[in-house]
């Protein structure tokens, strides 16, 4: 039964990917309002983080590491937020950078309000160091590309 459920998950994921790709192709062919394109991009990035989080939880439960998913989710979300900042700076998309900062904020709130109460000392140390390094990298990227970012905000 577990294999059938797993197969159903991946078939539905394939249909979701097909839907998102066809929506992207439709948006590129037609001249649509900028707000709709921005909303679509945010839906794509939201679907990716949702899928990655779901896969992480599924694999952690299959490996019987149910308690480690809290730590792993925080690191995943922080890494994905760093990825969104890099893409936002590289492609000069303000909405991705703002979304990444929002995701970092959610990750830090989750860390302080939920994870700390249930983790031992060593996992807490690992998660604080990992997220601290990610935040330092984001800070470095913002300082390095300060001129581009200021130009994007003035548009």
Image (cartoon, helix red, strand yellow):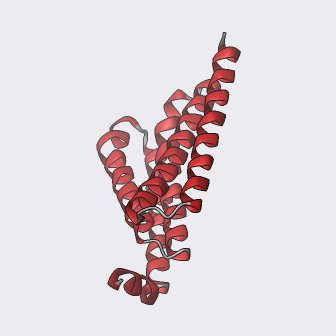
What residue is at 41 percent from the left and 57 percent from the top? 36
Q: In which quarter of the image is residue 117?
A: top left
Residue lying farthest to the top in this orientation:
1
Residue lying farthest to the bottom in this orientation:
147
What residue is at 47 percent from the left and 53 percent from the top? 40
Quarter of the image containing the N terminus? top right
Task: Give the x, y percent position of residue 8.
Answer: 64, 22
Q: In which quarter of the image is residue 12?
A: top right
Vertical placement of residue 139 versus 133, above or below: below
Residue 54 is left or right of residue 4, and the answer is: left
Vertical placement of residue 93 versus 27, above or below: below
Vertical placement of residue 1 versus 82, above or below: above
147 or 20, which is in the foreground? 20
Task: Give the x, y percent position of residue 148.
Answer: 46, 86
Quarter of the image containing the C terminus? bottom left
Residue 114 is left or right of residue 45, and the answer is: left
What residue is at 35 percent from the left and 45 percent from the top? 110
59 or 100, which is in the foreground? 100
Residue lying farthest to the left in this orientation:
113
What residue is at 50 percent from the left and 72 percent from the top? 137
66 or 17, which is in the foreground? 17
Number of residue marks: 0
78 or 152, which is in the foreground? 152
């Amino acid at each position: 039964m577990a294999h059938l459920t797993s197969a159903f998950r991946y078939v539905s994921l394939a249909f979701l990917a097909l839907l998102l790709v066809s929506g992207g192709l439709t948006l590129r062919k037609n001249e649509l309002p900028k707000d709709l394109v921005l909303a679509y991009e945010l839906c794509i990035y939201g679907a990716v983080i949702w899928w990655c989080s779901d896969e992480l939880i599924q694999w952690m439960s299959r490996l019987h590491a149910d308690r480690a998913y809290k730590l792993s989710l925080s690191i995943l979300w922080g890494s994905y937020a760093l990825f969104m900042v890099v893409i936002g700076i590289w492609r000069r998309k303000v909405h991705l950078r703002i979304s990444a900062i929002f995701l970092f904020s959610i990750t830090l709130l989750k860390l302080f309000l939920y994870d700390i109460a249930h983790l031992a000392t060593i996992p807490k140390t690992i998660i604080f160091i990992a997220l601290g390094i990610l935040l330092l990298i984001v800070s470095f990227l913002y300082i390095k590309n300060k001129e581009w970012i200021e130009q994007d905000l003035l548009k």
